[in-house]
Amino acid sequence: MTALTRSLWLFAVAFGVPQTLNELTRKSYLELLEIAPTVQFSSTAYESWRNDLEAEKQRESKRLEQEEKKLQESIRQQRARLNTLNRQPHKDTEPMTEERRQVHCSIVKAVRQLQDKRTERSHGLPVKYDNRLAKAELLEHWPGKLAEIRRARLEDRAHLRAHGDVMDTGVRAVGDGQAKDVKLGQDTIRELKGYGLMPPELDDAAIRGYAQRLGDTIAAHSDLKIPVQVTVLQSKEINAFALPGAYLFVTTGLLEKAASESELAGVMAHEMAHAAARHGHRLMMRATAANIVYQAAQVAALIFTGGAAGIGAYYALQYGFFGLGMVLNLALLGVNREFEAEADQLGVQYCWHAGYDPRGFITFFDQMANEEGYVKSASWFRTHPPFYERIVSTFSEIEYLPAKDNLRVDAAEFHEMQKRLTTEIRKRQDRKAPALRRFPECDDEPPLKDSGPDRAPTGSDHDSWCAIFPIRPSPIPFR
């Protein structure tokens, strides 16, 4: 929050023009951390607002559901029209061919819109309201938490908190046994690639080298006892994840989206913390990687196709990180409230030790909270859920850490990497690559990029065509 913004806020409060909870929960997390000590709402006001928000969410969900039903009915009518056309003679006349093409286009368009609505209702909508709930909790509880932190520092009790031995990072006992996870990570990667669930790797040596160097810098100031291996995946989805054994994956979408090097460092440090604390291993004690991958892939296929697994689902999973996120998020990535909060805290420490401004992770988190486009934000928040505990754990740790001058926010090398990535992506788009032939050619459609790693991986184009002519693959076996 800038000094001017804070001054305007204090002026508004002083002259009796306070903002409502609705207005406040649309601000960034960083702004709210500054504002929270100046805000006072009763517990009744918070409860009433939460009830209103839930009612609003339900109304929005019903609206989207009704729009889905209208689209389903439109698809049914258009298919009925096809049946009528197919019962008529002279099917190969030019007028009949044109009419059939128009019906095909109407179906493809409606199916794409239907998939977008389903994604919005099932993923985008919950994320939107979860973020607002987390912000309300921040306003309600952060002032008390901040006072507690300051008392602990004043009374020299800060080191007694969990992972308070921050000056011993690298030699303390965090995630003992990391070396045992290397084989698990290798096996998981091999299985994911074998089943087409891993987007292809970027082949640009300079960009890969930059990502690895940044990863090495952070790892050298972390609790990892094993080398980190950073892989850049060609996917427009904005995400990152770490598999057991310190295998760190970042997408080209993330490299493009990050606004500064400290934002990228914050995301990578958070993922390294999952590997260092062995969260994936701890959640996989009762399950094998194969079971998780196979079962989640079937669930993802049902979500993508609305209940009918087809070749569209295969390609959606092959090229879309969104599918990968659903496969991995629960067991392999260590996503639960306790582990996310711990990874946030440790990630802050690793950034601080490495000389980066640890607030970068939150500024990136804010970006994603305001991201337009439900597939992208749903993918990020599927593996980085927005709940109050993780925001508080991040900023609590920032408050606990000793002040350090000259923390790095940005670097020229980061922006040089982004420019190179933009150039590389354009080259790949101009390059003629193998593509799925999609029929029909519709006049009002946006240009279709190739179906390889550079296209936006929503899966909707494949699913649209598959919805017209479903092809059922062999089922993925459960083990």
Image (spheres, grey):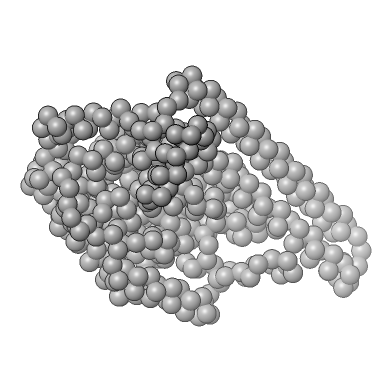
Is 17 placed left or right of 206 in the picture? right
Along the line of sight, which residue is nearer the eye, 388 or 384? Answer: 388
As drawn, which residue projects farthest toward the front? Answer: 15
Q: Is 253 positioned to the left or the right of 205 in the image?
A: right
Return the x and y of residue 65 as percentages of the image width and height: 67, 38
Q: Position of residue 293 (x, y in %)?
A: 39, 47
Q: Residue furthest top?
A: 44
Residue 119 x %, y %: 57, 46
User: To which quarter of the image does residue 398 belong?
Assistant: top left
Can residue 440 be seen in the rendering of this structure? no
Q: Quadrant of the C terminus?
A: top left
Q: What percent of the width, then of the height, locates residue 459?
A: 56, 57
Could you tell me if residue 376 is visible in this image? Answer: yes
Name the residue located 58 percent from the left edge and 34 percent from the top edge.
57
**Quarter-of-image position of residue 143:** top left
Residue 122 appears left or right of 193: right
Choose between 248 and 337: the one closer to the eye. 337
Residue extending farthest to the right is: 89
**Vertical position of residue 65 compared to residue 119: above or below:** above
- How many labels sit on residues? 0
Identify the residue shown where x is 50% and y is 80%: 431
Q: Residue at x 42, y 39 (%)?
A: 10
Vertical comparison of 300 with 253: above or below: above
Side of 445 relative to 298 (left or right): right
| 389 vs 304, nearest the viewer | 389
Which residue is found at the position 52% from the left and 66% from the top? Answer: 455
